[in-house]
Image: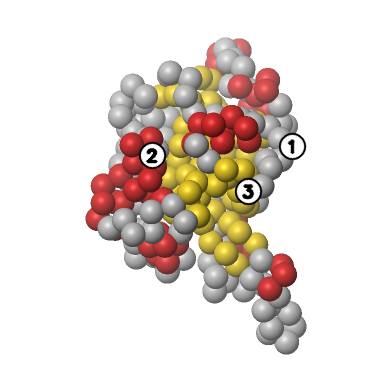
Amino acid sequence: MCGRFVSASSPEDLADYFDAAIDQAALGANFNVAPTHEVPIVRAVERDRTISVVRWGLVPFWAKDLKIGSKMINARAETVAEKPAFRSAFAKRRCLIPADGFYEWAKIPGQKNKQPYYIYRTDGEPLVFAGLWERWKPKDDAGEVLEDELVETFTVLTTSANGDMEPVHNRMPVMVPPTAWDSWLDPATDQDELLQLAVPAPDGLLELRPVSTAVNRVANNAAHLLDVVDVAEQG
């Protein structure tokens, strides 16, 4: 599962990192990205990589309204090729989602509260989640498509946890290495090859840091959310 993450890198840094053109400028650093927020993603346009700002929470083209997107923030790698909400996007519209890190909550024995952790790469490089994106067009009362109100949305692909993540959660985002970026973005890539990429990250790639429960509130959004805390004192 991936329900919150950090998107704090500048558009220019992302453009350099992905060798991509900036289609839309990012909205500024977001240290507590939540569903329905807009963040930069990387897509392929005629084999060139572009960075666009897209809403988190995939809305299938057949959906009646945007509300369904809040339930479609993640897609399970094990079923993504068959699920009606995701199979079309999996086949034709894949993306990369840059993240500085993400949050996950671990159960605390004997307590109802959970301890949040910030999870990031040990080498300081950005995380690159595998994602899918969709275009959705609302309709007016007469059932006519409102072409000028197109909304683009995305979801994060998840898989089983690796050794780093298992103490905290049994799921994790699928992470795409640079050597596989082009294959993931290419609409012509065979689905069997794609599913071979949808596996847990190698053990040792990630580091987990306990952080303040302030991250629980979406309204809290600043760099201090990444500061390490003493779990015993917070509990």
Q: Nearer the viewer, mark 2 or mark 3?
A: 3
Answer with the quarter of the image where residue 69 lies: bottom right
Answer with the quarter of the image where residue 68 lies: bottom right
Q: Is residue 64 left or right of residue 43?
A: right
Q: SS of the residue at dot 3?
A: loop
Amino acid of disc 2: Val
Alpha carbon of mark 2 to alpha carbon of mark 3: how far? Answer: 22 Å
Badge 1, how many Cα within 10 Å: few under 14, some, many 20+?
few
Alpha carbon of mark 2 to alpha carbon of mark 1: how far? Answer: 30 Å
Residue 132 at what x, y percent from top left? 47, 54
Which badge, 2 or 1, is on the more N-terminal residue?
2
**Mark 2 touches mark 3? (CB < 8 Å):** no
In the rendered view, tell whether residue 189 sits above or below residue 4.
Answer: below
Q: Where does label 2 land, which residue?
A: 176
The numbered disc on residue 23 is 3
Amino acid of disc 3: Asp
Q: SS of the residue at dot 2?
A: loop
Q: Quadrant of the C terminus?
A: top right
